[in-house]
Structure formats: C-alpha cells, structure tokens
Amino acid sequence: MLKILGYPDRYSVAPGETIAFKLSQEEGEDFAARLVRVIHGDCNPEGPGLKFRHVPTAIDGRHPGRPQRLDAGSYMIVDPMPPLMAGAFTFFAMIWPTRPMAPDQTILAQWDPLRQAGIRIALDEGFLSASLGSGTGGVETMTLDRPMLERQWYAISVSIDPAASRVALEQRPVKRYAHIDDRRSLSGRLAMAPAAVAAPLYLAGCPGADGRVTSHFDGKIDAPMLLSGVQEAWRYPALLEGDPGPVIARWDFSQAVRTTRAVDIGPSGHHGRLVHLPARGMKGWNWTGEAHDWQRKPAHYGAIHFHSDDIYDAGWETSLELTIPPDLESGPYALHVACGESDETATREFYIAFFVRPPRRGGRGKSRPAVVFLAPTCSYIAYANHAEHITARGAERQMGRLLTFGHADLWMYDHPELGASLYDSHADGSGVCYSSRLRPNLNFSPRYHSWLGGHGSGLYQYNADTHLFDWLEHQGVAYDVITDEDLHEEGIDLLHDYRIVVTGTHPEYHSTPMWDAMKAWIDEGGRLMYLGANGWYWRIAFHDELPGVIEVRRAEDGIRTWIAEPGEYYHSFTGEYGGLWRRMGRAPNVICGVGFIGQGFDVSSYYRRRPDAGNPRAAFIFEGVSDEIIGNFGLIGGGAAGIEIDCLTTSLGSPPNMLRLASSEDHSPMILLVNEEFGVVPPALGGDQNERVRADLAFGETPAGGALFATSSIAWCGSLSHNGYDNNVSRITANVLKRFLDPTPFT
Amino acid sequence: MMPGPAAEGGPMVYKIDPQTDRHYIEEFRRKPVGAHSPGLQRLLNILRHDPSGWQVILVCRRPFAAWVLGLMPPRRDGPLQIEEGPVFASREEAEWEVFRRRWRAHTGEDINLPFRD
C-alpha cells in the first residue's frame, strides 16, 4: 500500500516561480524531500534502470507531514440563505436519479449537523423523504412508500408549514408505464416543531458534523425552485412555463453553463456556487431531441448531473513550496518524498512529477535550444488515476494478461474519492467527462508500472515518456519542455523559439487553441517528431475560470470506454462540439501525417522496410541502418511497433508526399482495428488477420521547409535504450533529430 | 486507451472440451503472454470471463521480482483478497498458475505440470 502521496499546484513552472506541493502521509509525522531531475522512471531490469539526478535546493531535508483527506462529491451551495423554515415554503424540482438504490442521497438541505436542526430532502434507497430537525434532539422523517426508478424523470414537491408542523411530499413520474405505479404523495403532521436554521442551502449534498459535505445525490436535478407558502404540486408545470409565483429562489441551470455559478432567476438573487464540477450542458426533463446543442435550445438543457464521486480540487494544504532557481534547466522534474523505508507491503516514497518550462515571455530571450519536448499533460490529466483495471470487467481479456496491481493501485482501489480518469465511469455508470490535476495523479509519476502498456515494462503515458527523457539525456540533446497547458494558453508564440517539437508517446488530447497553434507552426516550417501514436485524437476543452481541468465528450465515434448520451455532445466549458478531431474534419493525419489505426496491449511487433526507405529523400534517416527489420526488441511489449499504432491515410489528410519508410507486421491477434475505421464490422479485426493493422514509419517535407516524422507507435520509445542505445530505432531517431536540427530548409 | 467494459451477456456459445482443447495447455505453458493461436485465444477469452464479477488480479510485491495473486470482488466496497502465497518470480509463472486454476474450474481436471520442466 502507498503511504505517502501528493500533487503539485501546477504541472508547469518557470524559473523564478514558486510551485506548491500538497502531501498526505499515513505514517509518521514528517517526510524527507528533495528535487530530482527525472531521467528514467522504469525499473525493469531488462532496461537501463531507474535514473534520477538530485538537484540540491533549499528544500532538501525533512518537513512536517500529516494525513489529508479527499472529499469527493459535487453539490450546489447558496451562502448566505435565509432560514427557509422561518415560514411555510415549498420545494419543487425535476430529478433523474441515476443510483436510486444507494442510501442517504441529499437533494436539498438547509441543515445544522451539530444541532440536528433544519430540513433535508433526500432519496434513500429510492424512497423520497423529508427529514426535519427540531434542534433539541428530535428528527422526524416522512417517506413515500414507492421507490423511484433509475434514470426516470420525476417531478417532486415538498412543502413544509413549520407553524402547523405539516409536511407534504409528492413524486410524479414524467413518463408513465403500464403496470408501474410510482406516483405517490403523502402529507402529515409532525410531532415536533422543526427549527429554522441560518445555514447555507445545499443541493446534492449535506453538511456533516465533521465539516465535510456528504450524503451526495447521484443524478440530474432540473428547474429546482423554492416558493413561499404551501403550494400544491399541480402548480409546478405552470410555474415551469413562466407563471408568476411567490418565488423565494428559482435556479435556472441552463444559464451560465460555462461557469460554476447557478443563477437564481427569482427576485432575491440567491445564486448558487457549484463545487467539484457537476456535469453541465446536460439535457433536462423536457429534452426532445429537437436540439442537440445546449446553446441553441437552453430551455431543454436545464439539468445538472451531480455525482457522488465528482472531484475538482482536493484542496489540500500546502506541505512544501519550491521556488525554481533561475538557472535551473527546463526539463522533467519531480519532488521525491519519503516517509520511511519501502518494503513488500508498503511503498513509503512518491515522486510528484512536474515540468520546468523555459522562462516566460520577456525572460526567455533568443537562446533557447532548438528542440522542445511538448509534454502531453492534457493526456496525463485525461488518464489521471485511470482505474479500468478496477472498474471494468473484461480488461484482462483486452490486456491479454493478468491485471497488475502495484502499491499505488492498491491505494487507488481503496480510495475511489481520488476521482477517476476520463476513461472511467462514475459510480452511477455515467461517463467521467471532466478531469482535473488538482488532486493526486498516481499514474503521472515515475516508477508507476501500469496494468496496460505492454508486456515487459508495462508503462503507459508519463512513465513511458521517461524512456524518451532517458534517450535525450544519453544523446546529450539540449531541450526545453513546454506542456499542453502552456501551449493552450500561449499559442504559437510559444513554439516560435524552436525548430523541432518532439512529442511524447501518446499525445492524444488537444484543445482547439493547441491544435491551431501546432498546425500553424507546422505550416510555418516547424519540424515535428511525432514519437508516438493515437495523437491529436480527442478534442478537449479547458474551463474559462478554473485552472487545470479538461473536458471531453465521447461523442459518436472512436474508441470510447463510455459513450456520451445523445444530445450531450457539446462541451459545457466552451460550447464546442466534442468528440474526435477526425469528426471535426481535422483528422490526426492533418497534423502529424498519420492517424490511429489499431490498438492492443499485450505484445508489440517490428517494422519491415518499405520501398520508400530507398528514396533519396529518406537517405538521411537510414544512414548507418541497413537492416530490413527495425525494432524487433524493446521494453514495451518486446517490439517498437505496438500498443497503439497509426498509419498513413491520404483520404484522411496524410500529405500525399509522405514516404512510407517501413511498416509493422506480424502483430498479435489482440491488436485490433479501431472502430472509426469501419462501418460494417469485419470478421477479422486482429492484427494477425487484418492487413490494415500496421504502424507506418513515415516522413514528409512541408512546403515551408519543415518536415514531419512519425513513428506511429506508442512502443517506439521503449526500444531506444536496447543494446546500450545502439540499435536501429535509436539510430533512426538520432538521424532524424540530427537533420531536423540542421536549419537548412527541406525541399 | 482501451475499450470499455465487457457487456453483460448470456452463456458462451463455445464450450471448453477438455479432450479437444487439451493441446492448448502446452501452447499456453510455452508462451503465457503473446500472440496465441486462434484456438488458444478463444479458450482464453472464455477462461478470462467470470460472470460472477470476481476478478483475479496480480499483486506486485516487488517490481519484476515478487508477485502474488489476489481476488477483486464484484463491488469496489468489498476488500481485495490477496494471497500470501505462492509467490511468483515472474508474471509468466503467475499466468500459468491462474490458467491451471481456471482449467480445473471449467473441466474438473488438474494440470499437473510445472511452468518450466
């Protein structure tokens, strides 16, 4: 089990800036810390082994530490809010429970947990209830006697008359079914007088005695409103249509969708604040399919989907701050922390990864290296705490081997409140469409060996990229690091300092500003070394106000571990249509020359030279490489071609002048054609039978004197260190880098 | 990325026949991880599916050195059940042990063969 972990407040920090680290430790009262340059995070004995270079700084030494907790679960809070039970009132809402059989789910609360006073409207194992507390020890609950059905809309009505101690509840299904009688109502008198409390108002959560907000609701809430007096349930539809009423508050969730604000359109402006990013831009109870874009028909998008396991910002207190020395080279770094010696039962150290970027504009000067590594931090965030080995049965079949659990995975299993990746589903089965870096990201860390990522080292995403860091170090290549977030924020200007952009093994997620910047830079003559696959695949969105969080909508096509609901394909953060870049008319091929074709996670294969390898234009690539077979070795699945692979497809935008230098072959049956590549399901999807499943090693010049080089394989970088870095994968990569460094334009 | 969870379904059409499928035992023993013949792949697809929701896992005690098996319950709120032993020195050894257990569960037959002769 993992005994210490943490996260930084940013993934990219410039010299002179301060980065804060937030740690939690389960053992001891202090921890040792040191800054390290990350060179190689793979401890596979078949490879070069772990390599970290200590960078002495003022933080070397021990620091006080303590446990910090994670409180997941999204909710709305209105603070301040007048005491509801100062008089009679009624609560109306449309709700769509997605995990109705779970206990203790708050829909609305104005509750003092210490005095046990106020009101809480909840769903408890499917039954709608209202609990009222007197503040003197008495809590009474009235409950309807028929449970709600999952993923069905209900109009609920709860009215309270404190003076008369009367309560009335009603649930009315929007859609009725034969033989199902789930419309219920109940009214009665309380034996005690409920107390009015001056406390914030919550939707989808309730304050607990320990200071946390708990008892979250899983599902959608649409058109919640509070009215003065006891109102009959039949009034709700008319109110929804705009009839005036004695409104205390009426929240219109179709407004300010891009924000964390819940707008009260009532007279008093009791606006709410949404915490931990419940899903917005969600279709509501009255969605008809007439519009699929929440911006075009806001009235149909009045719902927010709350999840008991949403998390945006863990909010941990800072344990340690580091001001980056002004002369520290740009590159991959980590804070190494330890609270004891590790053994077979526990890991008591952790590497909190981050990148030191070049100085910001104004301090950057003209003396940057020619090479920049574009750290795919959006992909690292998308995969943050990827837990399908825990949640998805069938993963062992897909991996072609047993699912591995290291100490970090054991900790992850016990702590679902860590929050999931964009590959996982929430506890209620709905897809996770937001992922944040403001929480521990266990697989954004050197030494993390993944349950997917190929037999052998089993690395994927960040730690697989350390194979490249190691090779660059070994080759003595001077390079800067910028991150996806840097590129999103600063655009092409950030790329202008560099002649070569080197990608990681899996640069999959890109926002529109990132895409535009990269394309413009390539068109201006930039030289792209795409050392991975499945790149430029999903469109993502950043939030206007919240740092460090991205959104994806898994719409229509592509490899999707969950599928967005019809009508929910538009990003709530930007209003952009979500999904594959390919479906925006911007296939990966347009950027990097190749596009996604196959994936499989057991073993990798090799490339065989193709006739284009003999083209004089490619002579520099094969200088010193006469081998017919390329990359029949490696730490990721035993070969350079595997895990996820791309190929040239001119019809999707691969430039017609691209050379197909080599193609992989002899793939495992478990590397499968991806589903956006066929309309009719073919009988032979596996790489052992499908001739389209291949990685193309590709090169092509651009009209502006630049060039594209694509390895088209996630496994490529895992082969770089083979035989003491003396191998044809390393040689080809070095040859390309050498020519790309030469400012002579490609013609 | 990987595809999503396996969809719930009915019984497999193909049934493991210990007589006709026996030769796959040796194929798996020789290469527990890697490209398999279509017949062995079909066999593994069946063995690796547990409709109960329980999932065998491989717990790493020391990276690339010591592994034990565990069981993950259908629901995450239940604890992992991690075996004290046997301790495997490689993934392949563990794969073989799980194969043997699953073969016995499906056919009632023991495979009394070590991973390596």
Image (tube, helix red, strand yellow):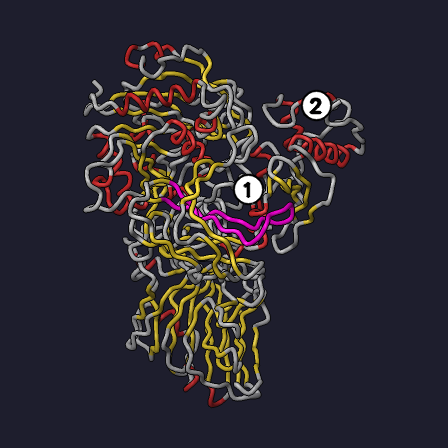
Along the line of sight, the residue nearer the viewer: A388 or A101: A388
Q: Nearer the viewer, residue A458 or A713?
A: A458
Residue drawn at (29%, 70%) of the image: A265
Q: Chain of mark 2?
A: B
Using the rendered image of the protein, determine whether residue A283 is visible from the camera's viewpoint. no
Q: Residue B5, which numbered label?
A: 1
Comparing A497 with A707, the one in front is A497
User: Which residue is at 56% across, 65% downward?
Assistant: A126
Callout 1: chain: B
Quadrant containing the C terminus of chain A is: top left
Is residue A219 among what the camera can see? yes
Spot the residue most to the bottom: A163
Provide residue A42's location: percent of width, then percent of height: 51, 35
The magenta segment:
A332-355
Q: Residue A197: x and y, percent?
A: 44, 83
Q: Position of residue A656 (x, y in %)?
A: 28, 19
Q: Position of residue A408 (x, y in %)?
A: 56, 47
Residue A18: quarter of image: bottom left
- Is A375 placed left or right of A640 in the picture? left
Q: Is residue A414 magenta?
A: no
Q: Amino acid at mark 2?
A: Tyr
- As for residue A346 lying within the magenta part, the answer is yes
Residue at left 30%, top 19%?
A658
Of labels 2 and 1, earlier in sequence is: 1
How many other residues sit within 10 Å of disc 2, few (<14), some (14-19) or many (≥20)?
Answer: some
Check residue B24 in the rendering and tell me which mark sits there, or answer none.
Answer: 2
Mark 1 crowd level (few <14, some 14–19, many ≥20, 10 Å Cα) = some
